[in-house]
Image: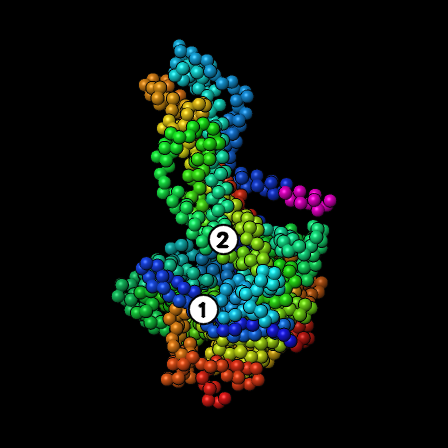
Amino acid sequence: MERIIELKNVSKFFTIGGGLFSQKKTLRVLEDLNLSIKKGEIFCLVGESGCGKTTTGKLIAGLLKPTSGEVLFYGENIWKMNKEKFKKYRKSVQIVHQDPYSSLNPVKTVYDILSAPLLKHHMVRSNGQCEEKISELLKIVDLTPVEDFIYKYPHQLSGGQRQRVVIARALTLNPEFIVADEAVSMLDVSIRLSIIKLLLILKQNFNMTFLFITHDLAMAKYFGWNGKIAVMYLGRIVEIGPTPRVLENPLHPYTKALLLAVPEADPEVTRNKKIMELRSLDLPSLLDLPPGCRFNNRCPYMEPGKCDKIEPNLYEVEPDHYVSCELYGDET
Amino acid sequence: MNKKISRFKIFLGSLRDTFRLLRRNKLGFLGFIVLIFIILMSFIGPYFVPFDTTSRLDKIYVKPSWEHPLGTDSQGRDVLSQIVHGGKDVLIVAFLTGLLSTLIAVTFGSLSAFIGGRLDSAITSLADIVLTIPHFPLLSVLAAFIRLKSSFMIAFILALLSWPGLLRAVRAQVLSLKERDFIEAARALDLGTSYIVFSEILPNMMNYIVISFILSMTSAVYAQVGLILLGLVPLASHNWGVMINFAWTRGAIFYKHSVYYILSPIIAISLFQWSLVSFTRSLEEIFNPRLGQGV
Amino acid sequence: MENILNIENLYVDYRARRGLVKAVRGVNLELKRRETLAIIGESGSGKTTLGLSIIKLLPSSAKISQGKIWYQANGKKYEVVSLDNSKLRKFRWKEIAMVFQSALNAFNPVIRIWDHILDTADSHDLRLTREDLRAKVLELLRLVQLDPDRVLRSYPHELSGGMRQRVLIALALLLDPQIIILDEPTTALDILSQRSILELLKRIREELNLSIILISHDLSLAAELADKVAVMYAGALVEIGSVYDIFYKPLHPYTMGLIKAVPTVTTSFRELISIPGSPPDLIDLPPGCKFHPRCEYKGEECLKDEPVLINVFNDHYVACYKWEKIKNGKNN
């Protein structure tokens, strides 16, 4: 399988301040990120807020430019592409946002929302064709009977229905890759699963590739069971590998801490979990990161002299399962 | 065919809803009625009420009577007919100024905010410069060189001076809307800058734009009347502003019954302003529920 | 152990533009001393309204149309619904306190934390001197593991979400209440912050002998903390039982549906099943059982009269005509 998206040494910094009276500070949101996603793969990106996963999603969708490094689409740097190729890339990579209440224009009907990209990119040749295509899309996302939805405004739809419209919109240009940024986090529990199942059907029927960004480890496990998962912390990937391996054999202390900290919807399981005590509750600020491993101030396995001095290297501990932690430096 | 009928029905339905919402705010609805009345009076009234141009020097500043419900002016001419005929210019200038300044401010403000970068810096700098120019001194200077006689001319000049304030406000709104998810999705769908700005962002600001337009009309009225009072505009036609000017310069304050001559245009202008402002209250009612509030 | 709280046949309605929203319909619920009760429901189930009713803190558009709420502790006895405003002010916070949903945003951003605490104390008629209040606050902050020096002088935005939630919990405990109600206490928090709040709650209920009511859509919260779980759907309770009964021997199709739709992280991979349809409109409820449009077990009787809660085993209640079928039939 070929690599559809690759990030090579991508960094994203934001500068804030820097007026007459305050010093310029750099927010190091992402630093030296490397990952590659194969066509048809489900790639989960998990982490807590502030880890940079949303920024990564936007970089992959071409909505942000990296400060340094390359974003590759089928091997080509998207920011060095000519206009035509970039247009093609744009149509191929779409995004589904978290909040179904702000990802649809409140003053437009479902028809307006779905017809805009179809008409703009000349995917249909007449109004009749447009309506047909829209009906088709609504059927794919299970919003039937179509007439009940086509002229509704977003506020007349429920959260789950809106999210389906968002997905239908993402499908209008026949994309190959969808960035789902917390796509189900704001939906009710009983609706979440139906949307996830819809995404799985899309993968099956269209060989869709997904970047699934979430802080919900359980959902990432279910959706991405046959794919890969990467755990992010403060702008870096700390562990990456096939989902079953990472979740059943977590290597990085942070991954372990997360898995032990997550409460589970099963009383026996969750009450018998031995939580990992972290040395500190404080999350370092992205403006002022400590030297060495970014997790060192909280890590219970921290070795002074090593973890607070050098940036950890990436080690392949099992086939395709990488961890960025010096604890594994001696083993390999 | 069925689709066309159903869309038309939806349109009619929304008109009916609009009217119902208009009535919900009583003050706003009253403002709307008064506004319609003033517009009708100023544009259709003149066909029914002849403009009294006969000088009757024996009937200067006469007390109101059946013949002259608002009395007469310094030349014995009927005040009421002047009021009926005097609104047209004021309303036209107000409307044109509002329209022009809103068009400039909205177009450039939104593009400036959305595109950002150097275009944004250039436009905001220009806006800042124009904002700092004092209006009346500049107008006085201009009046010496240009004959500000047509309504369009006056409207044009006033609009050129009043767009910066509105532009900054529009720009601020667009800057915040720009970050919304549905705009980001539009960018991902490559819908194009002009489509995104004019078809996605601006419709979300319609209430703000329309209300700003109406309020800019009110400032245009004040500006215009101010210009007339200062004599910077040739007093060719007999509009309300001119009436105030004449009342002032022709000694109406010294007569007992001339108070109606002075007050009538002032009240007419104030009523027009009030009706505009009050109407915006109803407009807020209309625009808000559309954005989906309620249970 | 006697009951500290007894909700009898409670009905709460809201006046909305479209009609009357029947948010709470005939709820009967008991809370024992030192018990942790979780009220589980999705958005639109009426759980928040139920929580607010307990301390009669409903908005003006809401009205308790029927029912009584009995509170009994330490020789004091109150019937909450009949309390007038002055008695309510003495009752609230002193006997029962509440930490509201999205309370993280309830802080005034321009006031320091200490001033915020002062405001709260003043508005509840606290007859303490400044020194005593300060001592109490220091003690509470220690209890919630916050550094007073750091926290009291800070503005809300200078504290993390987890820290703000701890401040709110400390505030709720200011007058030593017997019961605290927490509405979605961990929803907006990261996994690690969430875990620290859960451990905090476990500790304080032990130390202070508290009775806790948890309102949430998050099943894992209930699995982690609750002794008893009440499942709410369309304004009514459909199942009540011990946490083990609810998770391992659910009898109501909705409860079962929820459990089957929520994934876990650390157990083996399991296929999930979603609940079809969506929750009903509280203004326009269907006849009979409100869940029947989505239920796979429905029979004729389900469309006629709404089932009432019946005690099927010791203290395991369910409102369903088909509970026996469910008990004997499907495996979890």
**Image quadrant containing the N terminus of chain B:** top right
Residue occupying the point 54% across, 74% down = A35
- Looking at the rendering, the stretch of residues picked out in magenta corresponds to B1-11
Q: Is residue B30 above or below residue C83?
A: above
Q: Is residue B279 above or below residue A27?
A: above
Indicate the chain on which mark 1 is placed: A
Residue C152 percent across, percent down from the top left? 32, 66
Answer few, some or many: residues within 10 Å of disc 1's Cα (few below 14, many 20 plus, some between 14 and 19): many
What amino acid type should be assigned to the residue bearing mark 2?
A: Phe
Query: In this rendering, does residue B199 appear at all?
Result: yes
- Give SS at disc 1: strand
Quarter residue A282 falls in: bottom left
Q: Is residue C32 magenta?
A: no
Answer few, some or many: residues within 10 Å of disc 2's Cα (few below 14, many 20 plus, some between 14 and 19): many
Identify the disc placed on residue A138: none
Q: Dot 1 corresponds to which residue? A: A29
Q: Dot 2 corresponds to which residue? A: B114
Query: In this rendering, does residue B62 appear at all?
Result: no
Measure the alpha-carbon separation of dots 2 and 1: 24 Å
Q: Nearer the viewer, mark 2 or mark 1?
A: 2
Residue C15 percent across, percent down from the top left? 53, 50
- Give SS at disc 2: helix
What amino acid type should be assigned to the residue bearing mark 1?
A: Val
In this rendered view, identify the residue nearer to me: A174 or B182. A174
Indicate the chain on which mark 2 is placed: B
In this rendered view, identify the residue nearer to me: C76 or A96. A96
Task: State if disc 1 and disc 2 touch (CB < 8 Å).
Answer: no
Residue occupying the point 43% across, 79% down = A311
